[in-house]
Image: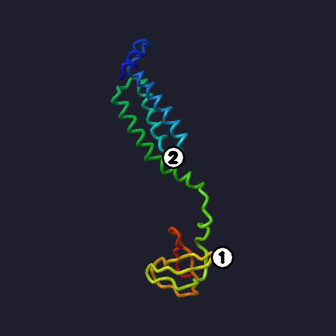
Amino acid sequence: MSGYAVLAAESSGLSDSSVAGLIWLGIFAFMIVAEATSVGLTAIWFAGGALVSSVAGFLGADIVWQIVIFMVVSLALLIALRPLAKKRIMKHITPTNADSLIGQFYPALTKIGPGHETGQIRIGDVEWRVVSEDGSEIPEGTVVEIRRIEGTKLIVIPKP
C-alpha cells in the first residue's frame, strides 16, 4: 500500500482491507466511466470484477485474494456475457444498401470465370464486377444470384 494510503488508513481508523475495498470502488468507478466513453464492451467486465473485489476487501479478504477474485470474476464475466451482449448489439446494425443486393437475380453481361476471372452484371445504371462462387464458368446472359459481397466484387452462382 502507498504511504498516503497507509497514513489515510491510520488517521481514519480503517483497516488495510477496507482501504483496499475503497481502492477497488475507485477502480470500479473508473471502469464504468471508461466503458461509458468507449461503448466497446471492453471495460464493463473489469468493473464487475472490481466491484466483487471491493466487497471482498470490505469483508476482510487479503489483498492477494482480492486480486485473484478480480481476475477470476472479470474473466468469467467476459467469457460468459460478452457473446450474449455482442449478439444483442449486433442485432441493431442496419444493413447497407449493398447488403440489400444479396439474394437478388441479374443477368450476366459478360462471361464469368472460370476460376477467379471477373465478369459483369448491371444493377440500375451501375456495372458491378462479379466472380463465380465455386470458380465455375457462367456464360453471358445467364441469370445469377448474388450470394455475398467481398470488397467491390459480388460473388454469384447461376440461378437455381
Q: CA distance from mark 2 to mark 1?
A: 39 Å
State the residue at coordinates (50%, 45%): 41
**Label 2 CA crowd tier, 10 Å (few <14, some 14–19, many 20+):** few
Residue 8 vs 105, above or below: the answer is: above
Disc 2 marks a residue whose amino acid type is Gly
- In the rendered structure, the answer to whether residue 41 lies left or right of residue 75 reads right
**Label 1 CA crowd tier, 10 Å (few <14, some 14–19, many 20+):** few
Residue 147 vs 67, above or below: the answer is: below
Q: Residue furthest right?
A: 124
Question: In this view of the protein, which residue sits in the foreground, 87 or 101?
Answer: 101
In which quadrant of the rendered view does residue 53 lie? top left
- In the rendered structure, the answer to whether residue 23 lies left or right of residue 103 reads left
State the residue at coordinates (57%, 86%): 142
According to the picture, the residue beneath numbered tag 1 turns out to be 125
Residue 61 in the image, given as x and y percentages of width and height: 37, 26
Residue 69 in the image, given as x and y percentages of width and height: 38, 34
- Tell me the element at label 2: loop
**How many numbered discs?**
2
In which quadrant of the rendered view does residue 36 lie? top right
Disc 1 marks a residue whose amino acid type is Asp
According to the picture, the residue beneath numbered tag 2 turns out to be 40
- Tell me the element at label 1: loop
- The image quadrant where one finds the N terminus is top left
